[in-house]
Image (spheres, rainbow, N blue to C red):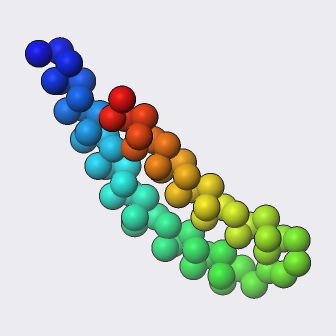
Amino acid sequence: MVEVRGFIQGFVSAIIGIVVGVALVPVINQAITDANLSGTQATVVGLVGLITVVGILMHSVRSLL
């Protein structure tokens, strides 16, 4: 019974993380676009969206294990 409860808590946590991530990623990308950066700054700040998506993915996978 304890294993099932842990799995359900992890699954719910993963779903909440994905929903928050789906809502957050477009906002981050729009803010990056509106910043009007160029050169190295644009490259580094452009990675923020990717890092956010990878973090959300890692959280979701970790919650399921």
The residue lying furthest to the right in this view is 39
- Front residue of 1/19: it is 1
Q: Is residue 16 left or right of residue 52?
A: left
Q: Position of residue 59 (x, y in %)?
A: 45, 41
Say which quarter of the image contains residue 46.
bottom right
58 to 1, vertically: above or below:
below
Rendered view: 46 above or below 18: below
Task: Determine whether 6 is above or below 29 in the image.
Answer: above
Q: Is residue 49 above or below residue 2?
A: below
Q: Quadrant of the C terminus?
A: top left
Tell me where residue 30 appears, x and y as whole percent: 57, 79
Residue name at image x 49 percent, y 73 percent: 26
Quadrant of residue 3 within the rendered picture: top left
Label total for image: 0
Quadrant housing residue 20: bottom left
The image position of residue 42, as x and y in percent, is 79, 74
Residue at (33, 44) in percent of width and height: 14
- Residue 6 left/right relative to 14: left
Residue 62 vs residue 40: left or right? Answer: left
Which residue is located at x 55 percent, y 52 percent?
A: 54
Tell me which residue sits at (88%, 78%) in the image.
39
Q: Extreme left residue here?
A: 1
Q: Quadrant of the N terminus?
A: top left
